[in-house]
Amino acid sequence: MASIIMPRPPVALAYGIGVDSTALLIELVSRGEKPEIVITADTGTEKPSTYAYLDVIGPWMKSHGIRHEIVRYQPKRFKHWPPYYSLLEMALTNATLPSKSLGGSSCSLKYKKAPQDAFLKTWQPAIDAWARGQKVTRLIGFDAGSRDRARAAHAATIDDPLYSYRYPLQEWGWDRDACIARIAAEGLPFCEKSSCFLCIGMAPAEVRALPRWCLRLIVLVEARAAPRLHTVEGLWRKSTRARPGRMTDFIRHEQLLPDAEIDTIVRDAPLDLVRFQDVAATIPIEERPTMRDWLERFNAGALPNGSAAVRAVAA
């Protein structure tokens, strides 16, 4: 009797639009190891440069016949709150900071890993592989540097019944400099470190490079969360010699926004947002305005009266 040849497990690449994962994608294609699918999880609060790089890498993937899916976390229960659809909107709704600033990691799990998992559970090649008793192979762009090696070592201690994980950059011995060189050799422009602009991992130079609208949102998030913060100062947690614990203090010290603008946001925006939430709670969920409605007015530089704004949107 002829033996049955089992199809190889499908391969999915987790693509963060950063240096490491971009170099990994390019090199895989050049080696004839193109993944069946590339998945990007959008937190809704990535740096503008990260979103801009999609205009570079998107056409490149299309030209190489690579399927690219962008997935997002979709909360379903809003209780009495305006619906929210991004990490930023979640923080403002709940008057909190991203969990990494509080010493946790749930923001990455909820807004990056969970939506990728949810999508893959609907992806037919994955469904077929699991039916055969196989695991889906997930490629992760951890490079050969010490920090990423530690992250990979920790991940290896977790037994995942659905996925096996590979870290090709570590197999090849590629560090960040090698990744940068590989992107340049492909003729593609340099891509910056990908990151949520609210992330504790943002370096001072990265904050300096942010556009004004991002800086305003940083001030807003820290002001909204301030009454509930007892063990951390702000998005950067604790002050160090290199920078303060609050990004707002850094923005003020560096004069990235005028003092008067910062003071107005801190004084008025959180109260206006609470009024917005209070009135939104009285409106049926199917008619309720979203947190995005309030943010559009904030980003336009106008802080609406909470009650009037909500009723106008819901009318």
Image: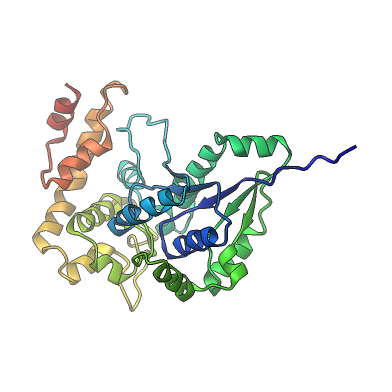
Residue 266: x %, y % from top left: 18, 54
Q: Residue at x 67, y 46 (%)?
A: 9
Position of residue 47 in the picture relative to residue 261 (left or right): right
Observer-nearest residue: 147 or 119?
119
Observer-nearest residue: 92 or 225?
92
Observer-nearest residue: 199 or 48?
48
Q: Quadrant of residue 283?
A: top left
Q: Is residue 205 above or below residue 200?
A: below
Q: Residue at x 24, y 32 (%)?
A: 278
Position of residue 170 in the picture relative to residue 218 (left or right): right
Quadrant, the C terminus: top left
Q: Is residue 226 above or below residue 294?
A: below
Q: Is residue 130 above or below residue 190?
A: above
Observer-nearest residue: 237 or 309?
309
Residue 73: x %, y % from top left: 43, 40
Residue 239: x %, y % from top left: 34, 71
Quadrant, the N terminus: top right
